[in-house]
Amino acid sequence: MKKFQVFVSSTYKDLIPERQEIMHALLELDCIPAGMELFPAADEDQWSLIKGVIDDCDYYVVVIGGRYGSVGPDGISYTEMEYKYAIESGKPVIAFLHKDPEQLPAKFTEKSEEGKQKLDNFRNLAQKKMCKFWEGAPDLGSVVSRSLIMLQKKHPGIGWVKGDQVPDKDANTEILALRREIEELEAEVAKSKTEAPKGTENLAQGDDKFDIECTFDSWHPEERQGYKWEWTISVSWNEIFFELSPTMMHEANTNQLWSRFISLIEKELSNTVPKSRKFKGHSNISEVDTDRTAFETVIIQLSALGLMVQSTRNRSVKDRGTYWTLTPYGAGVMNRLRAITKDVG
């Protein structure tokens, strides 16, 4: 029988009964719970271990009560770091938010204004994805059970099976040998691609411009109200590749490239929008977004230009993300765009 592994993330001391209810609910569903009980401390070494456990899980759930939790070096709590990593890794996620954290006992809530603000921001972030609400520990157990069953139907997991139910050793050995042979052949093909593919001379590239339609919010201090803007920016393919390429020096998944793409748009907006007469009196460009179609066009174009390819590197069968890497030709173009030239003056 296949069992699914579920990572349970939350603050700890304030949610011990709630975590116990979740663990019981998962065991009743024949799931394998995994969570912070496995890790005696939260530090850089443990963070690497935690990411590995999340990678091996089929599903990820986070429980948010009245505490933001201990923070890492970047000022972000380890609970939020785990949540963001699970999303970035493409894991199916559910967040369970307390309906009214202000009604929780004071010892289980944030005391500083900074902590309260970070908790509010985290709650808002979690509500952008699939989330449910709860009031007490018994209520939470039933909510988790129903939600996980629904998530399994929508996103079937790979799961774990007993060793006697997997292919025999000889079959696995043959599969691994064939995979290695494929990797070696693909590596040889990649090494031969040190020049742009034939036919790319007819494709937009280099300093050719690409128009991107995007939206953002602004604030007008005098009118004391916010505005939603639709804007078009024009960037060159070199500028786009300049921004995305370092992420793929080793490997980057699609979500990481999307983040860099949004960063490029934010930079371009901050450079051009304030110069427009229409923007006079406005400030605080925020909530930048764009149609996903533009990003997909960028991926296709850079692939067609021979600058990047989908990675074929072996990874955990539970990792269903799409990864991208530079071609040898793409690495050369990146170096030409980003390398600092010697000042001969």
Image: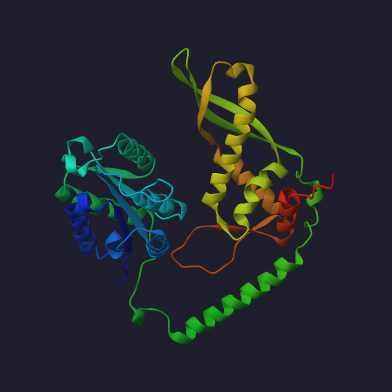
**Front position in the image: 338 or 294:** 338
Question: Would you say 321 lies left or right of 22 here?
Answer: right
Q: Residue furthest front?
A: 345
Q: Quadrant of residue 186?
A: bottom right
Residue 190 seen in the current view = yes
Residue drawn 69% across and 36% down? 235
Residue drawn 67% across and 70% down? 187
Q: Residue furthest bottom?
A: 170
Residue drawn 22% across and 41% down? 109
Residue drawn 38% across and 53% down? 82
Q: Quadrant of residue 266?
A: top right
Residue 293 seen in the current view = no
- Residue 86 point in image, percent of width and height: 41, 54
Question: Would you say 71 lies left or right of 292 here?
Answer: left
Question: Would you say 191 lies left or right of 292 here?
Answer: right
Q: Quadrant of residue 108?
A: top left
- Residue 175 point in image, percent of width and height: 53, 79
* Picture layout, residue 282 above or below residue 343: above
Image quarter where the N terminus lies is: bottom left
- Residue 24 point in image, percent of width and height: 19, 60
Q: How many marks?
A: 0
* Picture layout, residue 150 above or below residue 122: below
- Residue 185 point in image, percent of width and height: 67, 74
* Picture layout, residue 328 above or below residue 151: below
Q: Residue furthest top?
A: 222
Image quarter where the C terminus lies is: top right
